[in-house]
Amino acid sequence: MSKCSNKGTLSADRPPLGASAPMGGSEPNAVGSVGVEVLLAEPRGFCAGVDRAIEIVDRALQKFGRPIYVRHEIVHNTYVVNDLKARGAIFIEELDDVPPGATLVFSAHGVSQAIQREAERRGFQIFDATCPLVTKVHVEVAKLHKEGYEFIMIGHKGHPEVEGTMGQLESGIHLVEDVADVAKVNPSQTERLAVVTQTTLSVDDASEIAAAVKARFPNVREPKQQDICYATQNRQDAVKVMSPQVEIVIVVGSPTSSNSNRLREVAKKLGTESYMVDNADELKPEWFEGRSRVGLTAGASAPEILVKAVIDRIKALGAVSVRKMDGIEETVKFPLPKGLKIDT
Ligand code: SF4
């Protein structure tokens, strides 16, 4: 296990996705505004699963050449997807759009058994970028299913991770999106029932829903360790510490990113005005008028280069200093699948 790194995921002609932002600085480059301080959440941005998924596509491009087909956005971030597209990745939703003999990468969100089997049947060279923490949930579902369990899955309908996890079985996984859904769910038996969750939910919302499940089905089996991943938990915890200290929170993340949306909601629930932006151009000057302290974080799929651009833009709007908050140092690193070693 070593510190998360973004090395090896970048094109030569672009600035590194993981380039770190300059800290501090006290030059008033503002448009006449009073000095705004930017508080930078720790941890923020790329998690180990996103790092690994991008590196898999990057290495596949280096090793096998363009094009490399990727089923669904490798991670939910516009910049990352466009960067990989420019370098030869083709993002598809349907396997029919992948030509025979192609190299195919499954996204970090995971795929159903049906997609896995069909891709194998078609003979593609497959690299699975499913985050190992999502795979862990798949493995648990398969194991408990053999023991006769049905499942209540807490998650968002239509999210690819939920489709992938529910698609581990032909039937027997019942989705609940909120507490109200728990009353409506209708398992065929209640003796062997287990809870699984999407990895990127709000920790607080998920535990409220899990409590409602437990109240309705007292014998339900809960995961030994919750399925919400370390990165989701750590980023939400950092926003909880930061929010009371700032007047607004800016989250860097794409609209499709579940964990980024949850970060904005966490700040909002704590009463702090919060906005999510896909890039620095989406910042609105009026958000910063009359503010003295702004909080900044980034979802697990948002690269640090976007955070740096947002800092530069806030500085242009009046920020005079940037302060990194104390926080957990993440050291998780997941191994790459076999077959992607680059000969040097
Ligand atoms: S957010 Fe969590 S589950 Fe998703 S890729 Fe990152 S570490 Fe894996």
Image: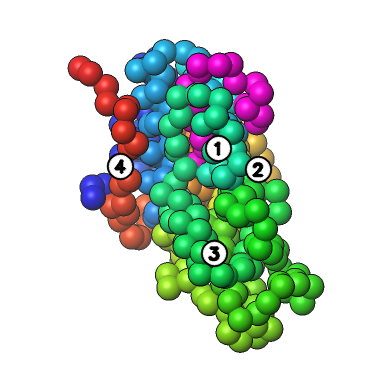
Q: Nearer the viewer, mark 1 or mark 2?
A: 1
What residue is shown at x 69% (from left), y 83% (from top)?
216
Asked whether residue 273 is in view, the answer is no
Q: With respect to residue 27, does 43 lie above or below?
A: below
Q: Give the range drawn in magenta.
A: 92-108
Tell whether 19 sits left or right of 281.
left
- Give the structural element (helix, strand or loop) at label 3: helix
**Marks 1 and 4: in contact by CB < 8 Å?**
no
Q: Name the residue under label 3.
A: 145
Q: Nearer the viewer, mark 3 or mark 4?
A: 3
- Please name the residue shown 65% across and 21% down the image: 97
Q: According to the image, what is the colour scheme of the structure?
A: rainbow
The span from disc 2 to disc 3 (Cα, nearest Å) is 34 Å
The numbered disc on residue 335 is 4
Query: Dot 3: within a 10 Å radius of its alpha carbon, few (fewer than 14), some, or many (20 or more) residues?
Result: some
Q: Name the residue under label 2.
A: 255
Using the numbered discs, state the Cα–Cα distance from disc 3 to disc 4 in whole angstroms. Answer: 27 Å
Amino acid bearing label 1:
Arg
Q: Of the residues under marks 3 and 1, which one precedes in the sequence?
A: 1
Q: In this view, does 85 lie above or below 43?
A: above
Can you identify the residue that label 1 sits on? 117
Cα separation, mark 4 vs mark 2, equals: 29 Å
Name the one closer to the observer, 10 or 263.
10
Residue pictured at 28% horizontal, 52% vertical: 331
Q: Quadrant of residue 330?
A: bottom left
